[in-house]
Amino acid sequence: MSKFAEPMSRLIDELKKLPGIGSKNAQRLAFYILRSSDEDAEALAAAVHDVKANLRLCSVCNNITDIDPCVYCSSATRNQRLICVVEEPTNISSIEKTNHFNGVYHVLHGSISPLHGVGPEQLRIANLVTRVDAGGVDEVIIATNPTVEGEATAVYLSQQLKRLGTKISRIAMGIPVGSDIEYTDEITMLKAMEGRREL
């Protein structure tokens, strides 16, 4: 393996810590940064610094924001009585792309996964229960991922929130639009059959 100058080795080591970045990609990125202009390198460093210095979690929904409460929680045009629960802040953009949901969000920052040592206490569930218990919530939509962990999280949340008397719903799952039933696995097919609706 080639020996790089210490600053380059340090940059490569730091880039390798990013998810999905191995040694080769870290080297490519490091050399790209080295070849870029001083202004571009400074802009990248400043952007990384600003993210760490200026972003925080919304005190209401736990979304990543630069203002508190976030734009969704403080919006006068959004339905504050409808809460959509998601695992990660990145899930919000997928829902927003539909231009159909006009409620607010609650971000758990993960899902229940005993194999990875993540229980309900490691997630941001307590302030969701507090939000619902305070009243003023008509429905909670659980939009966790269709994985074993996401299902376990949905079941746990449902049990915790149903006792508060609020309507709890789960996003529908099933066969993706444009796909072929022939290639659908049995779990997806089961969810599609369970989630059927009258025409």
Image (spheres, rainbow, N blue to C red):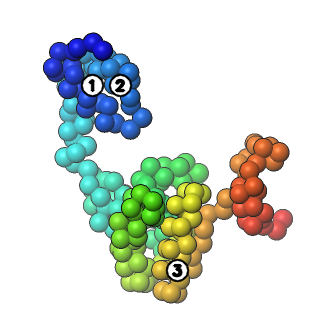
Q: Position of residue 12 (x, y in %)?
A: 27, 25
* Sequence-earlier tag: 3 or 2: 2
In the picture of the structure, the residue carrying the numbered disc 1 is 12
Q: Secondary structure at mark 2?
A: helix
Amino acid carrying mark 3 in the image? Gln
Amino acid carrying mark 1 in the image? Ile
Q: Is residue 41 above or below residue 167?
A: above
Q: Is residue 30 above or below residue 137?
A: above
Query: Residue at the spot x=26%, y=50% of the render?
Result: 55
Amino acid carrying mark 2 in the image? Ser
Q: Secondary structure at mark 1?
A: helix
Q: Position of residue 28 (x, y in %)?
A: 35, 18
Let me know if residue 185 appears in the view.
yes
Quadrant location of the N terminus in the rendered image: top left
Foreground residue, 25 or 75?
25
Mark 3 vs mark 1, CA separation in Å? 46 Å
- Mark linked to residue 159: 3
Mark 2 vs mark 1, CA separation in Å? 7 Å
Q: Position of residue 122 (x, y in %)?
A: 35, 66
In the picture of the structure, the residue carrying the numbered disc 2 is 23
Q: Are marks 2 and 1 in contact (CB under 8 Å)?
A: yes
